[in-house]
Amino acid sequence: MKKTKGHPLVEPSGSGGKIALGPLETFIGFHLRIAQDVSFQTYAHHVGESRVKPGRFGALLLIGQNPGLTQMELSRALARDKSSVTPLVQALQQQGLIIRKSCDVDRRRVTLWLTDAGEEELGSLLTHAEEHDRKLDAIVGDKKEEFLALLRKIVNELA
Amino acid sequence: MKKTKGHPLVEPSGSGGKIALGPLETFIGFHLRIAQDVSFQTYAHHVGESRVKPGRFGALLLIGQNPGLTQMELSRALARDKSSVTPLVQALQQQGLIIRKSCDVDRRRVTLWLTDAGEEELGSLLTHAEEHDRKLDAIVGDKKEEFLALLRKIVNELA
DNA sequence: TATTGTTATACTCTATAACTATA
DNA sequence: TATAGTTATAGAGTATAACAATA
């Protein structure tokens, strides 16, 4: 992906972007999608050649914040099917970032724990994420709390 | 995916959601991601068994709003590589929703046009999208303009 | 019977690189 | 040389269904 000056779909008019959006101009869902896309791609580019793909960062962080999390709990937290979690945690294990222990009280369950390397990697990823989010903070400015409140409201009323 | 009551990650505390988020609590990027995810899944579920996947809606709409768009223009507008656009437009063509004509003035180019069926399908998709976005409107309320302005600002300053 | 996790399988979306044809 | 589009190919990410082990 080339680095562009301004997003082709949400450009200040007159700058040469001639694509018409029609009804989408005022769709919240559409702008949410583009903003998330740009934010994610910027972050992914920033992290670059990290060993941990952006999509795995969330899992690593949830395990770090909730040691002993089971795969089903992780599945629910990520809102992904359990069969999608299996290859994810296997990859993290293979990278030496987590260990998986079977649960004593319910031997069906697998609990997840960060290794020392996992803690270290998570710390590094968090540093990058914080840098990225500081850019977003600067853009949003003093509207941040209001903005976050609306995003949370969307999540809670739609889910 | 099961229909859940409240998103597992952004739940009013005390409702049984015991997953800790740590630093993510105040990350704009994180909340953007979850909000977009929920919004998208709600829309996808709403459209249901449509012939056109949510991801193709954007392309169909851009062609509808910009008749004669070339594949490269579509590629830039969607911020996707041209090689990703080829199978996309081929699928839309196979569904009888668009036609592709080679451009007279530059015979390398392919221009894209909706068929009557494409117009009809787009109309139906737009109706669903509007219904979905009305839910978002209700959630955001009178903060909508401010909210959209922030989303646009994120896109323009990050891209 | 219900739940946890795995496996087999498949589909979508995306990209890189090499190619053709035009310019 | 540079651009528009295709093809071959590969890699994430995801889901459904059938399964084994356990509750």
Image (cartoon, coloured by chain):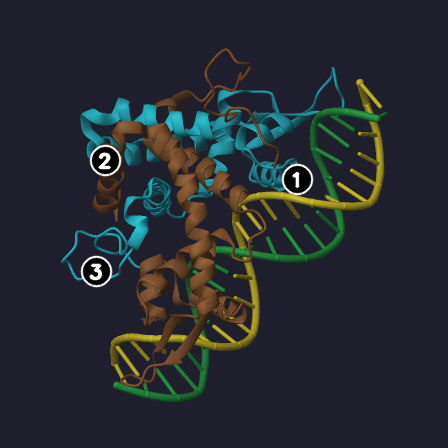
Chain colours: A brown, B cyan, C yellow, D green
Tell me residue A148's x, y (percent): 26, 38
Q: Count the marks.
A: 3
When the figure is inspected, residue B103 is found, relative to residue D16, above or below; the finding is above
SS category of the residue bearing label 1: helix
Q: Does the rendering let one see residue A84?
A: no
The residue indicated by pointer 1 is: B83
Amino acid type for the residue under numbered disc 3: Gly
Amino acid type for the residue under numbered disc 2: Glu
How many residues crowd mark 2 within 10 Å: few (<14), some (14–19), many (20+)? few
Which chain's residue wears label 1?
A: B
Mark 1 and mark 3 lie on one chain; the one further toward the N terminus is 3
Given contact means CB atoms under 8 Å apart, are the residues at marks 1 and 3 in contact? no
Q: In the image shown, does B112 or A92 lie closer to the viewer? A: A92
Q: How far is mark 3 from mark 2, CA to CA? A: 22 Å
The residue indicated by pointer 2 is: A145
Tell me residue A123's x, y (percent): 42, 56
Amino acid type for the residue under numbered disc 1: Ser
Which chain's residue wears label 3?
A: B
Q: Which is closer to the viewer, label 1 or label 3?
A: 3
Q: In the image shown, does D1 or B117 lie closer to the viewer? A: D1
SS category of the residue bearing label 3: loop
Given contact means CB atoms under 8 Å apart, are the residues at marks 3 and 2 in contact? no
Tell me residue A157's x, y (percent): 21, 44
When the figure is inspected, residue A46 is found, relative to residue A83, above or below; the finding is above
The residue indicated by pointer 3 is: B17
